[in-house]
C-alpha cells in the first residue's frame, strides 16, 4: 500500500486532498515531522494562501531541507497550488526566498481589460508533456478548478507539463521533472478529472516503489 505524507504547514485545508488520495487506494498521514517525509512512499505538498507565510511556516518547522532531500532522492512528490509556487526561487507576491528547486519566479497576472484577478473557476488544460503520469486516462484539454492571482514562470520551458489561458495570457498550469510534479489548480476540487489525477499520482508512486 502506498503511504503518502501530506505536509501540514498551516496553509490550507488538507483533508480534501487526503480524501482524494485515499479514494485512490493510498493511506495518508498529515504531518509536519521531517522523519515522516523520510519514511513515506510519496509526499504531497498542498497549500492555499500567500508565498511569504508559507515559506516562514516551512522554515519554522525545519521542513525545507527534508523536502529538498526527498525530491533529490527520487521520492514521488506532488505540489498543489501554493505547493507548486514555493518550489521556485521567489515570488513577486513577497520577499522570502522560495525552496529554489525549480529555477524561475512566481509572477502576478498582468492587468488587462475585463480580466478577473484572481483567476478563479474552471478552465482548460493544454498538455505540453502528453506522457506525464498525471495526465493518463484524461480527455484532451480537460477542465480543472483554479484559484490564483500569481503563476509560475520557470526558466526552462521543458519542465512545463501543462498550460492554461486566462484572458490573453497563457501561463504554466503544471510542471513535471521525473519524480517531481506540481499543479497550479486544485485536483481535489476538480471533480472526476481531479480524482483521476490524484489516482494517477498514487499509481505512479506504486510503480516507482
Image (cartoon, grey):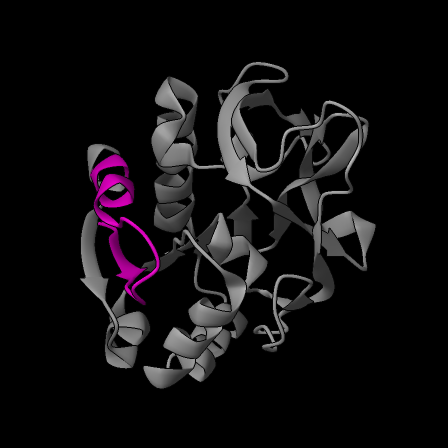
Residue 146 shown left or right of residue 130 in the figure: left
Q: Quadrant of residue 93?
A: bottom right
Q: x%, y% of residue 105?
A: 72, 62
Q: x%, y% of residue 151?
A: 66, 47
Q: Is residue 49 magenta?
A: no
Residue in the image at 31% along x and 75% along y: 38
Q: Which residues are magenta?
A: 1-20
Residue in the image at 23% along x and 45% along y: 18
Check the picture and name the quadrant holding the C terminus. Answer: bottom left
Q: Quadrant of residue 119?
A: top right
Q: Is residue 55 visible?
A: yes
Residue 46 shown left or right of residue 178 in the figure: left
Residue in the image at 60% along x and 44% along y: 149
Q: Is residue 62 visible?
A: no
Q: Is residue 15 magenta?
A: yes
Residue 8 shown left or right of residue 91 in the figure: left
Depicted 26 relative to depicted 197: above or below? below
**Is 50 or 189 nearer to us in this picture?**
50
Q: x%, y% of residue 43?
A: 36, 59
Q: x%, y% of residue 75?
A: 44, 64
Amino acid at each position: 500500500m502506498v503511504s503518502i505524507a501530506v505536509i501540514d504547514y498551516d496553509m490550507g485545508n488538507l483533508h480534501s486532498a487526503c480524501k482524494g488520495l485515499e479514494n485512490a487506494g493510498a493511506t495518508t498521514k498529515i504531518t509536519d515531522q521531517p522523519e515522516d517525509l523520510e519514511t513515506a512512499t510519496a509526499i504531497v505538498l498542498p497549500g492555499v494562501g500567500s508565498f511569504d507565510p508559507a515559506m516562514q511556516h516551512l522554515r519554522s518547522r525545519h521542513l525545507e531541507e527534508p523536502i529538498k532531500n526527498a525530491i533529490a532522492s527520487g521520492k514521488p512528490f506532488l505540489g498543489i497550488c501554493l505547493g507548486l509556487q514555493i518550489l521556485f526561487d521567489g515570488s513577486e507576491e513577497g520577499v522570502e526566498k522560495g525552496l529554489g528547486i525549480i529555477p524561475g519566479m512566481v509572477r502576478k497576472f498582468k492587468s488587462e481589460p475585463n480580466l478577473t484577478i484572481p483567476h478563479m473557476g474552471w478552465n482548460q488544460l493544454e498538455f505540453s508533456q502528453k506522457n506525464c503520469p498525471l495526465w493518463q486516462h484524461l480527455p484532451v484539454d480537460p477542465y480543472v478548478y483554479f484559484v490564483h492571482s500569481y503563476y509560475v514562470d520557470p526558466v526552462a520551458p521543458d519542465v512545463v507539463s501543462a498550460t492554461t489561458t486566462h484572458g490573453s495570457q497563457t501561463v504554466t498550469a503544471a510542471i513535471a521533472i521525473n519524480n517531481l510534479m506540481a499543479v497550479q489548480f486544485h485536483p481535489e476540487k476538480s471533480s472526476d478529472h481531479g480524482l483521476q489525477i490524484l489516482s494517477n499520482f498514487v499509481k505512479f508512486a506504486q510503480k516507482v516503489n
